[in-house]
Image (cartoon, grey):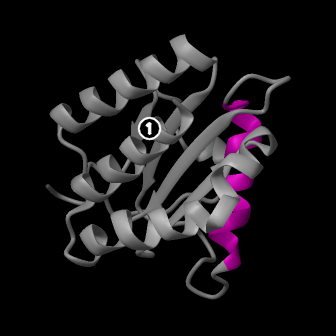
Amino acid sequence: RRVVVGQVATPKDVPTPFFGWVSDMSSVLPGSTVGKINAMSRDVKRQTGGEIVVVTVPCVAGADKDRAVIKKFATRLFNQWGIGERHKNNGVLILVSVGDRRVEIEIGKGLNVLFNEEQWLRHMVDEQIIPHLRQNDWSEGILAGASAAHDKLL
């Protein structure tokens, strides 16, 4: 699939998903992958009230000079969209900046213990997402991350 050229500067530049929990600005996810992620997110929402949201962007303005820009962008997007239940703080945002070749996963504070015990989140990204992204298999990498988050939440 073709990657969209461009960049986002603020979370307002990212369209909210019209249907479901996926905003694929970079056009790297086939419809079948979007459908699988939406089904997993629906499952999590129904069983726990939490949400798994996936966003792909072409690149984040300023990330070429400061890698922390993408983390800050992910945090702002997570908070602006209000991902997860407000009182449980149980949302997950998987942000992939294709042009920057970066993935950031933002989690609600209610998931800190669950996702960080034995460095689960770091290991999951390194072992299940990154190997696919290194081979430019964005779809499988993102799907693997969403699937792992789904399984961890349930």
| Of 11 and 104, the residue lying toward us | 104
The quarter in which the N terminus is drawn is bottom left
**Rendered location of residue 86, percent (x, y):** 81, 24
Q: Can the viewer see residue 76 in this picture?
A: no
Q: Is residue 81 magenta?
A: yes
Please say if 96 is above or below 29: below
Q: Position of residue 75 (x, y in %)?
A: 73, 53
Can you say whether 131 is above or below 8 in the image?
below
Say what secondary structure mark 1 lies in: helix
Write down the region rendered in magenta: 68-83
**Residue position for label 1:** 151
Q: Residue at x 51, y 36 (%)?
A: 53
- Magenta span has 73? yes
Location of residue 33 (image quadrant)? top left
Residue 58 in sight: yes
Q: Residue at x 17, y 41 (%)?
A: 30
> Which amino acid, mark 1?
Asp
Q: Main secondary structure of the magenta part?
A: helix
Q: Residue furthest bottom?
A: 65
Residue at the extreme front of the image, as rendered: 118
